[in-house]
Amino acid sequence: MKISKLELRNWRGFYKQQEINFSVDDKKPVTTIIGDNQTGKSDILRAIHWVLFDETPEHTNKPQDLINNFAEKEDKNASAKVSLEIITDDFKTYKITRILHTDLDKGGGPSEFSVSLLDHNSMTFKRQTVANEKRWINENILMHHLRHIFLFQGEVLSKAFDAGDSKQLKKSVENLTGSNYVNEASKMIDDFIDHKEIQQAKQQTTKNKDMKLRENIEKWEEEKKKILEKIAELEKDMELLTNERVEIMLKLRGSKNAELAAITAKVDSDNEQIRVLQSTLREIQEKKFNLIGDYGFGLFALESLKQFAERDEESKNKPEFLETIGTPIREKALQKLLDKETCICGRDLIDGEEPFERIKEEIAKTDSGAMATALRNIDSLANAEKIKAEVFKKSFPEIKKQYQDTEKRIEEIEFRLAENKDKMNSLSSSNFDERELNDRLTKINEQELPPITERLDDERMELRSINLNLASAKAKTPKGTAEISEIDRIIDSAGTLKDELNNFADNYEEKIATNLKEELQYLVEKYGTKGEVIEFDQDSFIPHLCSAATGERNPQSEGGANMKSIFFGSSLVKLTVSRKDDDPEWLEPGTTFPFVCDAPFSVLDGTNEGNAAEVVIGSGTQVILLVNTKAFMSDTGIEKKLQKLKKEGKRWFLSHHITGKQGSEVDSKHVLIGKDKYSAFIEDSDFEGSKAWEGKI
Amino acid sequence: MSISEKNKNTILKAAIRRCKNLTLRNVTIAEKKEKVFKLLNETISSALKGEEVEDKQA
């Protein structure tokens, strides 16, 4: 960063508009501003200080009197204005301007600050919006706490040394080198790690809770599974019972199965057929009996006839069987005959003609009329019986066949009926016991189904409860949270970064102290008193010049103290602007603000003046050297040194003009302006106040 | 995956710069932490994914 131009208008000793251009040539980075005492050298530094920070340096006389008194006298509304043109390291050119309308010693208010950026196309400055001027200056131009280093006034640093303000000095060194921000970043990373560990712990807690919730979910899902299995089993039992109940109810509603109905119908039919056939059989039997009865009677008659034919003499007159015919005895005999089925005898008789011939022979032989009548009756009867026998002979086989067929048919039906009855009984006994069915139905309805239904209700209620718990557990499970492993890796990486910073910072402060001491020692040895060594106060950067032999601090003259502060400031600037090769990549380059050095060269001897200038110029940055004319011009002074170093790019002179026109002349060399007495440096001038003009090198 | 040397330098430089700028702005410690933590979290996460980290405020 370089300062290219300073514009002053009515700024302290400078009356009206003044401009100073500075050398921005890297090879000749030095601009010397030469002037006698009270010509405005320090006001140059103060102007830069004020335009940047709205404050005048601590080592300033009348810090409240900023507006040029001549201008104020001429115009009570006169304002002070300072503009500073700065070229940044990235080649932006800013013009920073501050205007004070009413002087502070007259109760003036805040100054007016503005920033303009040079448009390289139009070569005009465009005003920038700056919300916070302090922040903008800090971030873009120069940090506030570095002002005493770069806007160097030997007295300020000397005072800091004398006051032992190690804290402020250390802070300045740390800020200047940037080590404080390394430390702060390290602490930030440390805090970040703590923060992530807390986050990790929280997430672990959350994860534990999640795991618990997931375990809960699994538990509830397991419970749900069990309950569902139970419910399925119960529903199956219930379904079986319900089906059974439906079947029973259907059966009880008369819906007998078709097989049983058919069998029953067949049984009924067979029973009816049997009844009919038996009736038929009875009719046949009756017919048969009738036939047999008639035939039997004939047989009986024939038997009697046979007995008559075989009668002995004694019984010939009265065949007893005839008297008994038609009586119970006869029927009994007939029955006996039938039971013995001895009718074959009659048939045998019928088949033969012999009995009838014999009857005819007997009739012929009889001499008794009665006997003959009896015999004729027998014969008539026998002939009638013979006709009956003829009928029987013709009808009986058919009737007998009918009877036998009917019997066979009945037998067949009865066999089938017996089978169907067995089936029917079987079916009836297994399915159609209504009472059993009703009992079963009652048992199902009152004993078996209710506990199942009750258990099902309970299980379903439990299932609802489980479902609620499950939903609750699922709802509580957070989604999209960072994995703990990711946080672990971030923490590990942050730890690595922190270690990197710590390793650097641990050595860096010591390194700065060492480097600073080495640089200071080099300067002391080169430009200071031989045999002196630089020592820092413990844990501070306050330098002391000590005797190499005894280690005792050497007493410091004013010149020595100033040289020490010049050495320190220059060394610090040099350390800041020069990056070391072994510095890490992440360490940003140091501040490169120009070194505006208002060293009290006048209190130094000629040799030290030159040495001090050489030290300042050796700082390695743009240098604006404010020097006293006497120190500049002396035989061993700064001019000679600059000629030797060939670093001077521009040279300006300051002069102070008092015409006396605006004030009363005190004497030949002084005039009074208001309450202040000014030196009348050049009496014959058309210019009032300090004036800068560029001189030749 | 470990952080590459380039990403490491970018993250550290960004963190230091952020600390510096936030200090200069006189923000509260809480605000500073919030911003730096955010930067660290984002850049380290990206770096761990193998992405090339950029300091957007550089």
Image (cartoon, coloured by chain):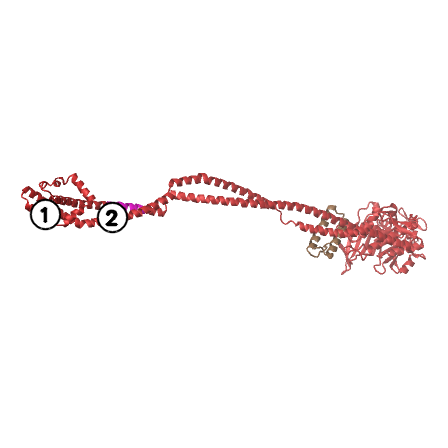
Chain colours: A red, B brown
Question: Residue A25 appears in which quarter of the rendering?
Answer: bottom right
Image quadrant where one finds the N terminus of chain A: bottom right
Say whether disc 1 or disc 2 marks the residue closer to the N-terminus.
1
Asked which secondary structure carries label 2, the reply is: helix
Residue named by callout 2: A406
User: Is A75 a magenta residue?
Assistant: no
Answer few, some or many: residues within 10 Å of disc 1's Cα (few below 14, many 20 plus, some between 14 and 19).
some
Q: Do the residues labelled 1 and 2 touch (CB within 8 Å)?
A: no
Secondary structure predominantly adopted by residues drawn in magenta: helix
Is residue A428 visible in the rendered structure shown here? yes
Q: Position of residue A429 (x, y in %)?
A: 37, 43
In space, the residues marked 1 and 2 are separated at their CA atoms by 42 Å
Q: Where is residue A170 in the image (x, y as percent from the top left)?
A: 83, 48
The amino acid type found where label 2 is placed reads Thr
- Residue at 67 percent of width and 50 percent of height: A485
Query: Which label sits on residue A492?
Result: none
Pick the front one: A114 or A581:
A581
Q: Where is residue A585 in the image (x, y as percent from the top left)?
A: 77, 56
Image quadrant where one finds the C terminus of chain A: bottom right
Q: In this view, does A350 lie to the left or right of A444?
A: left
Q: Position of residue A477 (x, y in %)?
A: 61, 46
Pick the front one: A674 or A206:
A206
Q: Is residue A304 left or right of residue A407?
A: left
Give the chain letter at badge 2.
A
Residue named by callout 1: A358
Answer few, some or many: residues within 10 Å of disc 2's Cα (few below 14, many 20 plus, some between 14 and 19).
many
Is residue A658 visible in the rendered structure shown here? no
The amino acid type found where label 1 is placed reads Arg
Give the chain letter at badge 1.
A
Pick the front one: A42 or A234:
A234
Q: What stretch is highlighted in magenta?
A: A265-280
Pick the front one: A118 or A228:
A228
